[in-house]
Amino acid sequence: MNSQPSELQKFLAAQEKKSLLRFLTCGSVDDGKSTLIGRLLYDTKLLFEDTLALLEKDSRKFGTTGDDIDFALLVDGLEAEREQGITIDVAYRFFATDKRKFIVADTPGHEQYTRNMATGASNSDLAVILIDARKGVLTQTRRHAYIASLLGIRHIVLAVNKIDLVDYSQSTFDQIVADFSAFAARLGFVSQIAIPLSARYGINVMAKSPQTPWYEGPALLTHLETVDVDTALAGGPFRMPVQWVNRPNLDFRGFSGTIAGGRVRPGDMIVVAKSGRTTKVTRIVTMDGDLDEAIAGDAITLTLADEVDISRGDVLAAPDARPDVSDQFAAHLLWMADEEMLPGRQYLLKLSTATVPAAVSDLKHKVDVNTLEHMAGKTLMLNEVGYANFSLTQPLCFDAYRDNRDTGGFILIDRFSNATVGAGMIDFGLRRATNVHWQALDVNKQARAAMKRQKPVMLWFTGLSGSGKSTIANLVEKSLAAEGKHTYLLDGDNVRHGLNKDLGFTDADRVENIRRVGETAKLFLDAGLVVLVSFISPFRSERRMARDLVAAGEFIEVFVDTPIEVCMQRDPKGLYEKARAGTIKNFTGVDSPYEAPEKPEMTVQTVTAPAEVHAQAIVAYLRERGYLG
């Protein structure tokens, strides 16, 4: 039997050893991004005959290049893209040469698809920014350069395309390069090269062209084959976010994950970043056997010399170059949802393998992605970029995004829809967070409640204006006071005369209103009181945030379910009439939404019985469950 490797095996082995470059193409509409990728695929001989036949057919039907093949159609796969002649979604393509493998992302040029471009940029090491030689540097060009820089791309190719349409003019090329370089000087790119080319005719794409004898640099493919993007992460400090604890049996306990930075060898000392516990690596285990060394990008399992408390979300790091550990940091945020970002609203923040609740505590400014100008703003809309402080419910380990994209980049997830709503890039940890610690108190919540012979609880009354929630809450407190119970009632109108008098009624202000009230109610709860909170609190997300502030069983949501028609008939303050007349803006139930509770502990329907009956039912509920001693 022949033990010599076959030609196929030799080919596959050779492919495995090649380095991989991920890059994206971006630029204004009609600058030729898709055409360039199609040209690369065609000229590297990676198209099957049936694909070529279909391309020729589609070129006659959808093409914009006359009798020539329209290479853009290789990438613009959506029917809407072909019909409109634009790129909408990110398209990924693979090709290879004798020297390197490539994954290229074709990203949209339109501003409304900025989030799509960011998706492609987040996984790329290099960006090819195309410029139409006839148009020069446009607003979109600057926007794409900024987004590429923001997403951590450090290598740029300025592809001055359609050079044939300006008669291969060197002066035109030089002016475009000068204009772009003046803008890009602020963006911190490690390498930047400009190439005159024609994607349609292959000028300077695969090889240097005699049409541009004045150009002394490399062809595009030559540069892509040789640019060094592999050494940065491997040369950095060791980082490995733990994906899972590997316990196949009682004799083996390892910690699995993908190395996000640096390298590791058996015998190296490492530290669990959050706890600060150090230990030694004993083995590097893979499916193909143990390794003597693993570097950034390798998926491995580490076994350690000591029994150390490690779980998913922990980060193993070099002891002499540890990541930051904090529950607050500053970061750039690209908003990717149709619904606006609201400071104070709690989202899920996913960083590496850890996921924790978090909120934007302070939006410092918005960034005009076309000019880099800083602008004031309270919220972020779709495709907008801001710079903000973040507050997390527990400390996480992280690096600055400029140092490590894997341990410095995060996404925000909506807690109810599970949709990704934002992408963030950490700038630095807020040092003040490391100087503030919980002070141990000898008299705690349990002791205070015991003195009052009651269990602390937060009764959260929610409903439309005029639903009767304040009336019922007041009756409940009056009944409890008659029994000698210790209570406090936080009412929406009363709080807005003091604590929240600076807030209006926009969605952002409503979120901040409930955040402050929730934190205040938590303090009263810590004092051992029965806290009654009567607020419209229209958004489920903020009511969920308030619930998460306290322990299980300490939050009771009371939905005062009164039809809006009844509320309008009552209209004790004349607010609905003013809202319908347009003199009051952002009024819940009229021009601002109310999100009814899905699973409240109690539902009160005021049209079925007087307020006194509902109040006594709530008191009975508390007594039956042991809150009243």
Image (cartoon, grey):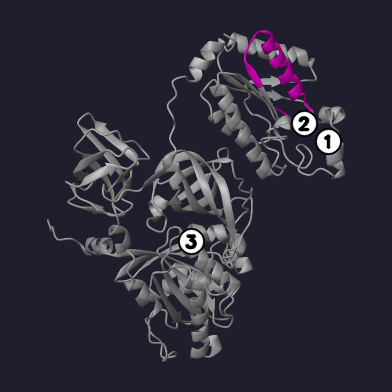
Q: Residues within 10 Å of mark 3 (few under 14, many from 20)?
A: many
The answer to whether mark 3 and mark 2 are in CB contact below 8 A is: no
Q: Residue 137 lies in what quarter of the image?
A: bottom right
Label 2 sits on residue: 465
Task: Please check the rendered image and state whether residue 477 is part of the magenta-colored stretch, yes or no.
Answer: yes
Quadrant (top left, top right, bottom left, bottom right) of the C terminus: top right
Q: Amino acid at mark 2?
A: Ser
Instruction: Indicate which disc, 1 or 3, sits on the residue closer to the N terminus.
Output: 3
Q: Amino acid at mark 3?
A: Leu
| Image quadrant in which the N terminus is located | bottom left
**CA gap, disc 2 and disc 1:** 8 Å
Of the image marks 2 and 1, the number of the one nearer the N terminus: 2
Kindly state the secondary structure of the residue where label 3 is placed: helix
Cβ–Cβ under 8 Å for marks 2 and 1: yes
Q: Residues within 10 Å of mark 1 (few under 14, many from 20)?
A: some
The dot on residue 325 is none
Q: Say which residue label 1 marks.
A: 575
x, y percent for residue 7: 22, 65
The residue that appears at 41% across and 42% down in the rendered structure is 396
Q: Is residue 163 visible?
A: yes
Dot 2: element? loop
* Numbered tag placed on residue 150 in the rendering: 3
